[in-house]
Amino acid sequence: KAEVLKERCNRIDANCEVETVLDFIDGDNMEEILDPLIDDRTIIIDTIDSSETKADLISYCFRKNVPIITCGSAGGLTDPTLIRCCDLSKVEDDRLLFWTRKRLRKYHRFPKGPAQGEKNTHRVKSWNVKAVHSIQRKGVKKSQGKESKGGGGLRKCDSMLGTVSFCTGIVGFVAAGKAGEMIVEDDF
């Protein structure tokens, strides 16, 4: 996938610099892999499926002051018009991002609520981490013992949510669009 993406980018613009790294990133090798690639023009788009590694990457970017756009889960999505982007601290109805936030608070000291001594207005402070997610509810309703698509998700069997390719594509396009917007507005 990485080599195909590099080839496509170079067909669009031969001057585009794309460096591929064919390795799995985790908390142990993150600095070794990313430090040589990071400069003042870097924006990271995260599509990791593990809340542990996703939290490690977000924390790394936060420490290194590297802008990041993280993507939530796409399993079970059927409506691409419900995909949004907001601050990670404000995302609802995405279990992957829920567990990522929980890990960020527990292991990486991200704030849960107001700072010590501040009044609690029940508004979570922004983390300045953009998150692409869907507002589509993914639960499956049960009607007279039978499953239906009425809950807003797509279920192929009892244990796995199906993924509709156009929804995963839209998540990627929204993330790329946000990165482009950040570059144009010099907001990173």
Image (tube, rainbow, N blue to C red):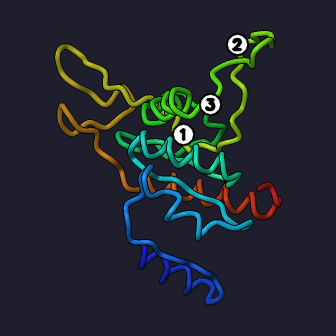
Q: Nearer the viewer, mark 3 or mark 1?
A: 3
Q: Amino acid at mark 3?
A: Phe
* x, y percent for residue 16: 63, 82
- Alpha-carbon distance for marks 2 and 3? 16 Å
Name the residue furthest bottom.
14
- Residue at point 50%, 41% (across, down): 55
Would you call the spot at circle 1 few (<14 residues within 10 Å), some (14-19), or many (20 or more)?
Answer: few
- Mark 2 vs 1, N-terminal side: 1
Q: 152 or 13, which is in the foreground?
A: 13
- Alpha-carbon distance for marks 2 and 1? 26 Å
Q: 58 or 77, which is in the foreground?
A: 58
Residue ID for mark 1 = 82
Q: Amino acid at mark 2?
A: His
- Residue at point 80%, 55% (across, down): 187
- Mark 3 vs 1, N-terminal side: 1
* x, y percent for residue 181: 74, 58
Quarter of the image where the C terminus is located: bottom right
Q: Secondary structure at mark 1?
A: helix
Which of the labelled discs sits on residue 165, or is there none? Answer: none
Residue ID for mark 3 = 110
Would you call the spot at circle 2 few (<14 residues within 10 Å), some (14-19), or many (20 or more)?
Answer: few
- Residue at point 51%, 38% (across, down): 134
Q: Nearer the viewer, mark 2 or mark 1?
A: 2
Residue ID for mark 2 = 122
Q: Amino acid at mark 1?
A: Leu
Q: 130 or 51, which is in the foreground?
A: 51
